[in-house]
Image: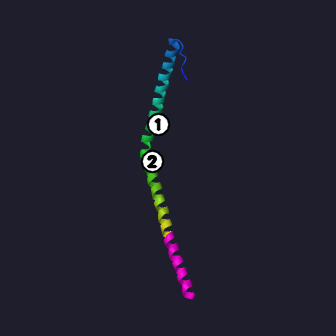
Amino acid sequence: MNWQIPLGDDMEINEALIKLEAHEKECLVRYQNIQDTLNKHHDRFDKLEEKAQHGFDKIESHIIRGIGFLSFLMTAILGLAEYLR
């Protein structure tokens, strides 16, 4: 297939280039504002990440302790059952 973009006169091309350049400038300003916002809240994001990690550590600790307790309980029950038999 032969893809060709139909070109108009020079005025249409210049208008398109002007609009494209204006669009690129506007996007650059928007992206810079987004980056500035992210930079401004960097410390806040670090604190949230730290809190989340602390929460995950607590959950992990509870799971490990729960597994240990269940293992102890199972051993005690099986030992008691063996003793009573």
Under mark 1, the amino acid is Ile
Task: Say if mark 2 contacts mark 1, CB within 8 Å.
Answer: no
Q: CA distance from mark 2 to mark 1?
A: 15 Å
Question: Where 35 sits versus 79, above or below?
Answer: above
User: Which quadrant of the figure contains the N terminus?
Assistant: top right
* Picture coordinates of residue 22, whole percent (x, y): 48, 23
- The residue that label 2 is drawn on is 45
Q: Foreground: 12 or 61?
A: 12
Q: Foreground: 7 or 57?
A: 7
Residue at the spot 44% in from the left edge and 37% down from the top edge:
35
* Picture coordinates of residue 85, whole percent (x, y): 57, 88
Residue at the spot 54% in from the left edge and 84% down from the top edge:
80
Q: Secondary structure at mark 1?
A: helix
Under mark 2, the amino acid is Phe
- The residue that label 1 is drawn on is 34
Mark seen at residue 64: none
> Residue 84: which quarter of the image?
bottom right
Overall secondary structure of the magenta section: helix
Residue at the spot 49% in from the left edge and 23% down from the top edge:
20
Range shown magenta: 66-85
Asked if residue 48 lies in the magenta stretch, the reply is: no
Question: Where 56 sits versus 79, above or below?
Answer: above
The first of marks 2 and 1 along the sequence is: 1
